[in-house]
Image: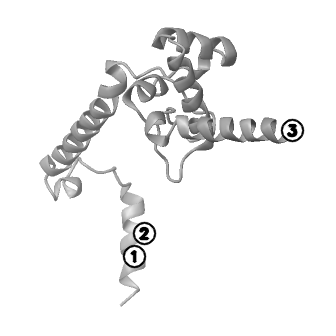
Amino acid sequence: MKKLRTSFLLLAMVAAGLAQTASDLDSPPVNRVAAKLKCSCGCQQNMACVMPPGCPICKTNKTKIFGMQKTGMSDQQILDQYVAENGKDIIVIPPGTAGFAGPYVALGLGFIVVMWTIHRYMRKPIGAAAGPGMGPDVDAETMARIEKDTANLD
């Protein structure tokens, strides 16, 4: 009787191992739900990630999602179950329009500032700073002292 029980348990384990394959876990229905959940391993990706050699947390959760789908749960019911177990932070919130456009707007504004700065410096004449009235006024006494000191250099 003990051998029969052991054989039956072994047969059940083999059947369970063959019942779901890696292709089942990476199927579009599973990845559709997994893409809406954050991975908690620290990779900052969703659970539909395909990191080599494979994230064990994602694989475990994909197995759980696959099992829930087999029982007939809808995508929203699965997501609600994950929120109930792990909190609202597990749901991936895709960036809105500003999230996608933000870097491009910043790049455009930076380009405009650089071009304005280049234009401003290119417009100024080269010798304009040395002309009369453009630089700081020098006291006549100081100028005479400079002339006297430079005359002794020769």
- Amino acid type, mark 1: Lys
Instruction: Return the x and y of residue 139 as percentages of the image width and height.
Output: 38, 54
Of the numbered discs in the image, which one, if any, rests on residue 145? Answer: 2
- Amino acid type, mark 2: Arg
In the image, residue 119 sits, relative to residue 53, either above or below, namely above
Q: Nearer the viewer, mark 3 or mark 2?
A: 3
Mark 2–mark 1 contact, CB under 8 Å? yes
Element class at badge 1:
helix
The residue closer to the viewer here, 54 or 93, is 54
Residue at image coords 61%, 17%:
82
Q: How many angstroms separate mark 1 from mark 3 (CA)?
A: 116 Å
What is the image's colouring?
Answer: one colour
Q: How many angstroms separate mark 3 from mark 2 (CA)?
A: 114 Å
Labels 1 and 3: the sequence-earlier one: 3
Q: Which residue is mark 1?
A: 148
Neighbour tally class for label 2: few under 14, some 14-19, many 20 plus, Cα within 10 Å: few
Identify the residue at the far front of this view.
Answer: 1
- Amino acid type, mark 3: Lys
The residue closer to the viewer here, 10 or 4, is 4
Residue at image coords 48%, 27%:
34
Identify the residue at the far bottom of this view.
Answer: 154
Q: How many angstroms separate mark 2 from mark 1 (CA)?
A: 5 Å
Instruction: Return the x and y of residue 135 as percentages of the image width and height.
Output: 29, 51
Residue at image coords 48%, 42%:
22
Element class at badge 2:
helix
Instruction: Return the x and y of residue 96 as percentages of the image width and height.
Output: 36, 18
In screen coordinates, is 26 left or right of 64?
left
Q: Quadrant of the C terminus?
A: bottom left
Of the numbered discs in the image, which one, if any, rests on residue 2? Answer: 3
